[in-house]
Amino acid sequence: MTIQTGAPASAPSPAETPWGIGVEVDLHTAMALARAAVDVLQTLSPEAKAAVNDAIERQAALLEIQADPLSRAAAQSVLHVIRDAA
């Protein structure tokens, strides 16, 4: 007796479905807009840059508290924005 696991080979992956493609487009759009907003805010003034960087550090700390691999990776990615702006 053979037990099959997983989806059949002919089933599309979730990312290949219209819903999955839409989610990917939304994610990339949100990330591009967020990066652009952070870039602009950091160039307004030294005070704006400090405020944005503080907010980014707080968000990274909240992600780190969750302690799962995806949250930790996101925290490092968010902190990368501060390092790039330095």
Image (cartoon, rainbow, N blue to C red):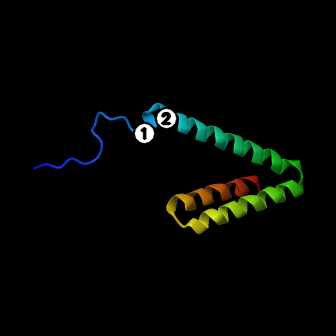
Q: In percent of the image, x 28 and y 37: which residue is there?
A: 9
What label sits on residue 14 in the rendered view? 1
Instruction: Please give left or right for residue 62 compared with residue 68 in the image.
Output: right
Location of residue 61 (image quadrant): bottom right
Three-letter residue code for mark 2: Trp
Disc tally is 2
Circles 1 and 2: CB atoms closer than 8 Å = yes
In percent of width and height, residue 38 lies at 76, 48
Instruction: Please give left or right for residue 83 compared with residue 75 in the image.
Output: right
The quarter of the picture where the C terminus appears is bottom right
Q: Would you place residue 28 above or below residue 67 in this image?
A: above
Q: Secondary structure at mark 1?
A: helix
What label sits on residue 19 in the rendered view? 2
The single residue placed furthest to the top in the displayed view is 18
Three-letter residue code for mark 1: Pro
Location of residue 79 (image quadrant): bottom right
Residue sitting nearer the eye, 78 or 30: 30
Q: In percent of the image, x 70 and y 40: which residue is there?
A: 33
Q: Which badge, 1 or 2, comes first in the chain's sequence?
A: 1
